[in-house]
Image (cartoon, rainbow, N blue to C red):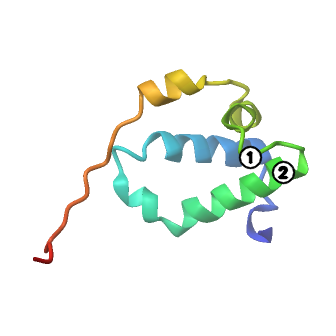
Amino acid sequence: MQRFSPFELSELKLVYRILHRNLMSQPDLMDAEFLEALQSWLQYRAGQDGVNLADHAQWDQWLDGTVISCEDRLADRRVIPLALDSVPD
């Protein structure tokens, strides 16, 4: 967790938001160790600030000061098709 400590929290939030916004256009990000580590560290910091991580509105508010309703979040949700190279019979 300490590897992100030297950086400004506001900069780390910005990098996370940009990467997260681009998950659909850059699917390799979903498996990126850096993004996973950054998200874990930000969630740790948010928890220290009293954010309930199960509440998406609190997470959004902490990340960038905006709140997206569940209805809006679900309206923009897309299903990512899985490519199966070989399907067992």
Q: In the displayed structure, would residue 12 be above or below residue 71?
A: below
Is 11 on the left-hand or right-hand side of 6? left
Q: Quadrant of the C terminus?
A: bottom left
Q: Which residue is mark 2?
A: 47
Q: In the displayed structure, would residue 3 be above or below residue 67?
A: below
Mark 1 or mark 2, which is nearer the start of the sequence? 2
- Residue 51: name its quadrant: top right
Residue at the extreme right: 49
Within-10-Å neighbours for mark 2: few <14, some 14–19, many 20+: few
The amino acid beneath tag 2 is Gly
Q: Which mark is residue 53?
A: 1
Residue visible at 89% across and 45% down in the picture: 49
Residue visible at 73% across and 53% down in the picture: 42
Q: In the displayed structure, would residue 78 be above or below residue 70?
A: below
User: How far is mark 2 from mark 1, CA to CA?
Assistant: 7 Å
Q: Position of residue 87 (x, y in %)?
A: 14, 72
Within-10-Å neighbours for mark 1: few <14, some 14–19, many 20+: some
The amino acid beneath tag 1 is Leu
Is 44 on the left-hand or right-hand side of 36? right
Residue visible at 74% across and 46% down in the picture: 53
Q: Which mark is residue 87?
A: none
